[in-house]
Structure formats: structure tokens, C-alpha cells
Image: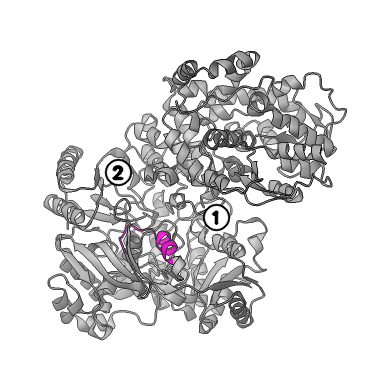
Amino acid sequence: MAKRAQGRGSDRELSRELGRELSRAVRGRVDLGVTARALTTMDASNYRRVPLGVVAPRDADDVAAVLAVCRAHGVPVVPRGGGTSIAGQATGAGIVLDLTRFMRSLIAVDTQARTAVVQPGLVLDVLREAVAPHGLTFGPDPSTHSRCTLGGMIGNNACGAHSVAWGTTADTICDLKVVSAQGKLHHLSRGWQNSTAPEGLRAFVDRHLATLRTGYPQDLPRRISGYAMDALLPERGADLARAFCGSEGTLGVVTEATVRLVETPRARALAVLGYPDESAAAEAAPGLLAYRPLTVEGMAADLVRVRGGAGLPRGGAWLFVETGGATEAEARARAAELVRAGAAQDSAVVGDAAGMRALWRIREDAAGTATRMPDGTEAWPGWEDCAVPPARLGAYLREFRALLASHGLRGTPYGHFGEGCVHVRVDFDLVSAPGVARFRAFSEDLAALVVAHGGSLSGEHGDGQARAELLPKMYGPELVDLFGRFKDVWDPDGLLNPGILARPARLDENLRFEVLPKRAVDVAFGYPHDGGDFKAAVSRCVGVAKCRTASDGSADVMCPSFRATGEEEHSTRGRARLLHEMLAGEVVTDGWRSREVRDALDLCLSCKGCRSDCPVGVDMATYKAEFLDHHYRGRRRPAAHYALGRLPEWLRRAAPLAGPLNAAARVRPLAALAKRLAGIAPERTIPPLAPRTFLAGLKNRPEPDAAAVLLWPDTFTNHLSPGVGRAALRVLADAGVSAALPSGRVCCGLTHVTTGQLDRAKAVLRRTLDVMEPHLTGAGGPGVPGRPGVPGGPGLPVLVLEPSCAAALRTDLPELLPDDPRAARLAASVRTFAEALEECAPHWTPPRLDRPVAGQTHCHQHAVLGDAAERRLRERAGLTGELSGGCCGLAGNFGFERGHWEVSLACAEDQLLPSVRAAAPGTELLADGYSCRTQLAQLAGREARHLAEVLAEGLGRS
């Protein structure tokens, strides 16, 4: 077993020596710093182990060099791909091998042989996109397909939704190139004569033929647990590559793999069958296999958090059964045949790509959605993917539910019902001693239940630390003893991923929560969805890493800084990991003053995309504001915090001098000096101030006798784009909606929040609430009409034209002032432009414009407000086409701050700028957010407009 010296002093000395030797031996990246270590303490499991550092090798020679240095020092090595492992096998106490940075190439594709040669760090979707034009795909497709790697899939023998048709990863492997712990390169294929096996492996198999023939359960399609040593039996062709699959990084490091591809059906259809509960759905699943579907997936109603069920048929649980065909009609016909055979209480057949994507997204997000019970209680992995023979699944689920209840636990099953594999996250208490004891007792009882049904403790994600301790219940002590000896043949020094699979760690040690402080953390925000607990908020991130997904052209926003940099520390998950380690205090030792956390959060655009796109609702924009507030408390801040964070104050003072200031900004030396003093990126142009503010232009406007809405004069509309406000008033007037204005100065506090000046933000918001109080009585919730009244009267909807300000009022305001009931009332009153028109003038007919549109939905609108009303309004006005997703990259103060120019530009190039360049002549460019319009003007030289401006212009033509 690999061992290393103990104690902080010896660890520091070992770390320095390792760093020197690795840097000399390796051409790739060696990082033994605080950030690299903090980012890799956890995967997507309940476990945490602190590594000494991270090495990103460039090739097989680098891998061998790392192993040689670590072997000399007795330091363990843990191979890691996307870090989405559920069972703890991608964490370790030695050196983590990051195979995603350099070893991520698609080396070759042979379309005739239907094979591909890949490196271990290649993301699955990158492979699938590359071979799709040839009508091919890689069969296994776990729900993390947009960020999991081929190496990780080989390590865990990953499966996914289509395994009923195309099998597991082990079924796809032709051959592997593997570096063993001894630094030797092995070629693994089918047959001893075609492979270069570790010394002694064949003799090991020959000695234990009887045990290998009788020790494994048969006829179990999802047997992933343990080592697949039975693949080495002569009657099975002595398949060394297959035997290596599922070894969880404990036998060797894959450096190259040749994989089989499958032909993709030209057309697909999805039959969704509704049943009363998951047991009924499970009992129906085996009967559908004879029809050779591509998938037979099951999930229960508890996981459907989409309003209206997203088009699902009636039922308490559903089977998603996908079919293929040469034509859409053929695929639909097969789906209809399955519907007839399924004996469901209700059903639907979907053949269009958009409809199927919407339904599949519910299923794919279940890994994250299931981490929260409907009442907000947290649920955790650990017993996430047991598998039983499909014919036993219905009975197993009933007994599983009873077992949960007997332990006082809750969980929502879903998964691959066609192969008897069930995913479930359970609301374990993994913090208190009694809760951890219950976790162990339940684990032991569930292992016994799975074995009683002839099942496997793991049906997809591997055993890791979560289940390996209990493998004797499944295999018996003799076969489990062989697991240890099998590992010794490959890794006699116990160097690779110790404590996983062979001679495993206990399932209730190394839990990631035990290091968090027991006392409450003093914070500024209320964290209403986490019981006011910042620790719980940070712990929301379970590591499924949807934030590490490259842009796919969808409306998703998260995570623009990761898409721009490709760096883990600039992903939502990476930042959550650093905050977790900041609270733990072991790796990040200087708490709120941490430079490592500050630097990771520096490139967070506060776009709020993770608030909606993260399956578990991590809200990094709020965590960033919280951190900055603590980090700079009593200290000097960056210049941009004073200049841009207090923008409303500066603009109010500058308004009388707009003309001279605009002229000065056009003088390059003066503009350069101003930008340097204000901490603004030198590449930026200072936007012009409005010669006359929006409010000044309304000075002589008579107040309406009875107003239907209150128009919020946000800073951006008032001082920088008053034309938006004037256009909104014109449209409202045409719709017969009278608008009043607040009786005093108001501000949403957005710029103070995004720069972490939370005391100032609270003061601004309290003053705003004092002004708004007369308008708030009787306000309804979002989309719920309040009572109409007169200026100063009760219940007026508050129309906010700037999406970022509306989002701040909807979320930041009540979360900063949770004890002030006025905050909740104002938040509930906020309406977007389209929402206000729908609510107050439902029968109004907008001008018919009949032109295509391009541009961007504001990221805060996407994340907080939603754009359904805007879509309906555009459709009624004849504005066709989709706005792009992503973030424009300006994001308020972010894109103006010095040091952010390149990332800001890269974010804009992700979706916004390409969509605008591709727009046909005559396309209307829409961007309701001031930041989005400014970014387009400065980077593309194109003028985009608020929807209100476009409609107002249309009124003039009608």
C-alpha cells in the first residue's frame, strides 16, 4: 500500500520535493498550489480527500514519469477525468492526474470499421459531434455526456440511457493502451496473443479458473461492481480490455483507447408512457424489450419540477421509450407499437427534435434535481445506482420504498428500468453522528436487499468508496480476496487509487461535510432556500458539473467564464469547491481573506445563470457578492468598485454636466486617464451620458388620474438610454395603460451588490422601500395582478425595463432584507415590460412588424425573470426567430473592469456575436439589457434596441 510521511511539516517538505522532481520530469503542467488542491478534494460524491497536488500530463511518457516520481516517494496517484464520479473514486490523497487538459484528442476515426481512437480526456459529446456527420455515435451516453470523459467512462464502465440497445462502455472497447503503476506501457485487447499483459496475470487467471467461473452472478445486464476478472476466462476470449473496464483507476492509467461506434438511426421518436407509480412502470419495462427499443428509462413524478409537467402524459411515473427508424414515420410507428404493448394509463408520442430534447432534459437533469426533495431538504448519493434483473425491478422497488421508510429516510427513484438499474438520492444526515450511523445501517440493509434480488451493488457508477466495503455481501469473501490479489498483479506497491475497490476504505469515513464548521457563518444575505445557512448554500454543489459544458447553442447561460477559459477554477463547481475549502480551513487557510477564492471569483460575471441552469440551483452571483463583502471589509477596494459599484451616485452627480463630460470622454488622453483612475479596461469606450435624463424629460408631464402601473426609472434607463423609457410610455399609452412614477428617488442597489458593498446596498434598498411603501399594499405575486389604484395607492404592478434591475428587485432585495416585509411585497410587484402589457392590457394588439430578430435574452432575465411573456409579445408583433442564449460578456461592471477584456470578448463570441453576424439583412437586433446593447455597439458596431423601442417605432408606422 502506498504510504507517505505524516504531519504538516513533513507534508510541506514532501510537497516541495515532489514539485521539484515532477517539474523536472514532466512536460505537462505541475501544480501543487492551494487552488489546484482545493479544486480536486471532491468529485460528485459524498467524499473528500485532500491531494498533494495536480499534474496534467501531455502524453503517456509524462504519465510514466509521474508514476516513477510518486513510486519513489510512496505517494498515491489518482487518475481523474471530468470529476463527475458519484462514488468517490476520483478523489485521493496523493497526486491527481488531470487527463482533461492535454490528453483530450480525437486521434482518428475509421468510418468503414466504425471505430475511433481517443485519448482519455476527450469529452464524450466532442466525440459524438465529430462522428455524427458520418451517421455514427458512441453508444453509452450517461446523463453527464456533455462533460464526462472517455477515460472516466472506461474507469467506471459507464452506461447511460441507450445501453439496452448499445451496451456498456466495456461492450464498445476494442483495445486500450495503459500505463501500469510500474511505468510500463501495456496493450490490452481480446486474447492473450494480442495483448501485452502485466507479468503474472495469465498465471493468476489459470490458478483461479473455478472461482472466476462460479463467483459472478449471471444474466445481470448491469453488473458493474468489482473487477470484471471473468472477462479473462478462455471461453470468453480472454478479453483484457474488457477486464480493465470498471477498474476505477486502480490498475493502470489509460492513455489511448480504440472504441467501437454504432450507426445512428436516421429518425427517432419518443414514446412516453404514464403509470400510477414507479413499481407499475418497472413491471411494464421488461415486456417492452422484445420490441428492441433504444431506451427504456423510468422516473417518478417527484422529479418533475417543471410547471405543467413539460408535456408529460398523466401518471405518477413514466417510461421514456425511444425508438429509431429510417424515417420519422417508421420511428413513430415503432413508438406507437410500444404504446400499444405498454398498457399505460396515458401516453404520448413525440417525434420532433425540440419536443424530445425538452423531455430528455427533465431526465438528464434528474441527477441534480434529485439532490433536493420537493420540500427543499437535501438528498445525497451513495446508493445511487443499484441494479437487479429487470424482471425483479418492480418487487425490488416496493421493498426498497419500505426499507427507506423503516429507516425514516426519503428518496426518489429513477433510472434505466429496461436494465433494472435504479438511481436514487436519499436524504441522509451526513453531518451528525446518529445520521452517519443511520447511513451505515441503511447501506448494509440495502446491500442485503439488492443481493437477495440477485442484483449488483453498482449498476453504472462503480463502487468507489461508497459501496466497495460491502462487496463481500455480493461476491463472498473468496472472490473479494481475489480482487486484492488481482490488483497486486497490476500494482504491487498499491500506488493507484488506494482505498478504492480492493482493500477499500470504510463507506462512512472521509465524508465531505465533517470538515465544515459547526457554528453558523455570519453572512449578509438571508439564503432562504438553505435555511439561512451559508454552509448549506455552498454545499448545494454536488459536482455533477453541468457548468463545465461547452456551448451547445441552447438558451442556457451557465457558465460563461468556464466556456471562455476552460479552467475548472472559473466554473461554478470550481468556485463552490473553493468556498467549501475556505469554510473547512484545511487547504484554504485564510478564510474570507483568501486570495485564491478572490481570484476564482474575479472572473465570475454574476450572470446568475447557475441560479436557473445548475440542476441544484447554486447561486454563485450571490456567493460572490457575499465573499467580496467580507473580503474587503475594512480594506481598500479595487478602483472599479468605487467607480462602477457606486455608479448610480456618480451618474446622478454627473447629469448636469453631461455635455462637457461627453466631450471630455472623446479626448483620448483624458479618456485614458479617467479609465486608469476608475479601474476601467483601456480597451473600452466610455459610454455617453444622456444629454437629458429620462426623468428630466418628464418634469412637466401631468400625473395620470388613475395609474395601472408604476414605471421604475432605473439608473440605466434614466441616465444612459432614456429613449427606452420614452418608448415604453408610448407603447403603454397606445395599449391604454396609464403609468405613474415613484414619488422619490429609487434604486435597486444592483451595482453595490455585484461589487459586494452589501451594507451600502442595504441602505440604498431601505431608502427605496421608504419611497415605495405607499405603492406596495396589496401587491400580488409575479404574474398575479395587484389591485389597481391611483398614484400613491395600493397594489400597482412595478414595471422595470432593465432586466438586471428587475432581477435584483425580485431576488437580491428580499434576500438582503428578509426581515422587512416591504421587500417581499416590492419583489412580488415587479413586472417586465411584456408581463405588464399582458397583465394590464391583455386585449391590446401590438403593431405588426413582420421581420426576423436576432440578439440576446439578458442573462438575468433567463435566470430569474423568465422570458415567456416576451416570446408571446414578439410572436404577436410578427417578430420571428430565436434570441441567443449565453451571456453577452459585459455583465454590468464586469466587462468594464480592467483585466476582464479578453474574457468579456470570449463570452460575447460564444453565442451573441456569431448570431448577429449570421443574421440576414433587415434583421431586427433586440437586447433589452443595457449591457447587451453596449457590448454589441462596442464589439460589433451594431445598434440593438429594447423591445419597447421597436414596438414604439412600429406604432409610428401603423
Amino acid tagged 1: Met
For label 1, the SS is: loop
Between label 1 and label 2, give the one nearer the viewer.
Answer: 2
Q: Reply above or below: 237 against 352.
A: below
Identify the residue at horizontal 40%, vertical 31% (top origin).
592
Depth check, front residue: 862 or 529:
862
Q: Position of residue 184 (x, y in %)?
A: 15, 63
Q: Position of residue 737 (x, y in %)?
A: 83, 36
Per the image, is 125 magenta? yes
Depth check, front residue: 25 or 748:
25
Q: Position of residue 943 (x, y in %)?
A: 62, 36
Start and end of the magenta stretch? 118-131
Image quarter of residue 816: top right
Identify the residue at horizontal 42%, vertical 19% (top origin).
636
Residue behind mark 1:
373
Residue behind mark 2:
37
